[in-house]
Amino acid sequence: MMRTVYKLPLVLEPQPEGGYTITCPIWPELITEADTVAEVNENVADAIAALVEGYEILGKPLPIALI
C-alpha cells in the first residue's frame, strides 16, 4: 500500500492543566491533543487518518491546500 506524506504546519498550544492542543492553520478540522511533545506525531497521524477516512466516506474532497 502506498502511503501519502503530508507536510503540514502545526500549532502546539500548551494547556494550563498540562499537555498540548494541536491545530493546523490550513486544515481547520485537524484538532487533537497530546500529553507530551513526544506524542504529537502519533496523535496527529491518527487524527489525519480519521479525517481522511471521514472525507472518503462523505465523498468530500481534501482541502485544496493538501493536494
Image (cartoon, rainbow, N blue to C red):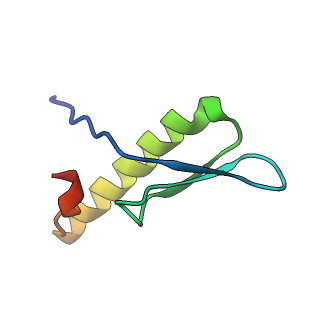
Q: Residue furthest right?
A: 17
Q: Position of residue 67 (x, y in %)?
A: 15, 52
Residue 30 falls in image quadrant: bottom left
Residue at image position (19%, 69%) is 60
- Residue 65 lies, with reference to residue 9, above or below; the image says below
Can residue 56 be seen from the camera position used here? Answer: no
**Which residue: 69% across, 36% down?**
36
Q: Measured from the top left, where is residue 27 in percent x and y? A: 36, 61
Residue at 15%, 29% in the rendered image: 2
Residue 43 vertical placement versus 16 (above, below) = above
Count of marks placed on residues: 0
Between residue 67 and residue 4, name the one nearer to us: 67
Residue 39: % across, % down: 60, 34
* Quadrant of the frame with the N terminus: top left
Q: Is residue 9 left or right of residue 33?
A: left
Write down the quadrant of residue 34 in the picture: top right
Does residue 11 appear in this view?
yes
Residue at screen point 35% across, 60% down: 26
Q: Residue 9: x percent and y percent?
A: 41, 47
> Would you place residue 9 above or below residue 57 in this image?
above
